[in-house]
Amino acid sequence: MTASVDTRLQPQQLRSAFAAHPAGVVAVAADIGGRYVGMVASSFVPVSLDPPLVSVCIQNTSGTWPVLTTSATLGISVLGSHHGDVARSLARRTGDRFENVPTELGPAGAVFIAASPLHLQVAIRDTIAAGDHHIVLLDVLDVRILSDHAPIVFYQSGFHTLRP
């Protein structure tokens, strides 16, 4: 006997299901013509050790991503448990996302969030259309492990900290 599957899932039902999966939070940022441009992503995934690759998923409707793609390199900062305000600031739809956000300028335009547990300097390798998002494959050019702060996670539509 074959079970039938309802393929008419509602967006809100999927959003609730996906919210049940805790995910790390990263900032993706660059200096574009003297202005810091950035966003948060909770779909960061290590992909490969050889060659060193990571990926993020970006909504097709993002107005920030097309601007970031003009940079030779991007900074990815894994946000720590103390970065709740930073994550909320970088997730804003309007205003200066970097207001009161401590940053460090890296090589070739990469921007990093200060006091993050991990900084990755990356360059875009490929972009793959995937429904209402794009999967962006990134070459890892440099890695700096900076602290042992616990990461912040996105879970049930909010930012939370992990306890060891």
Image (tube, grey):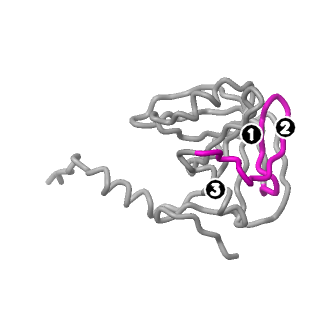
Q: Is residue 108 above or below residue 81?
A: above
Residue 125 x/y as whole percent: 65, 26
Image quarter of the C terminus: bottom right
Q: Is residue 110 above or below residue 144?
A: above
Q: Is residue 70 visible?
A: yes
Labelled pair 3, 2 in contact (Cβ < 8 Å):
no
Amino acid bearing label 2: Gly
Amino acid bearing label 1: Gly
The kind of secondary structure element at disc 2 is loop
The residue drawn where x is 82% and y is 57% is: 115
Q: Nearer the viewer, residue 44 or 39?
A: 39
What is the CA distance from the residue labelled 1 to the residue labelled 2?
Answer: 8 Å
Give the dominant element type of the magenta stretch: helix, strand or loop: loop
Q: Give the numbered dot on residue 99.
A: none
Residue that label 1 marks:
75
**Mark positioned earlier in the residue sequence (1 or 3):** 1
**Mark positioned earlier in the residue sequence (1 or 2):** 1
Seen from this angle, which residue lies furthest left?
Answer: 1
Labelled pair 1, 2 in contact (Cβ < 8 Å):
yes
Residue 19 x/y as whole percent: 44, 60
Query: Is residue 19 toward the left or the right of residue 30 in the image?
Result: left
Residue that label 3 marks:
87
The kind of secondary structure element at disc 1 is strand
Q: Residues within 10 Å of mark 1 (few under 14, many from 20)?
A: many
What is the CA distance from the residue labelled 3 to the residue labelled 2?
Answer: 20 Å
Q: What's drawn in magenta, residue-wise?
A: 95-117
Q: Give the numbered dot on residue 106.
A: 2
The residue drawn where x is 84% and y is 47% is: 144
Amino acid bearing label 3: Ala
Query: Is residue 138 toward the left or the right of residue 18 in the image?
Result: right
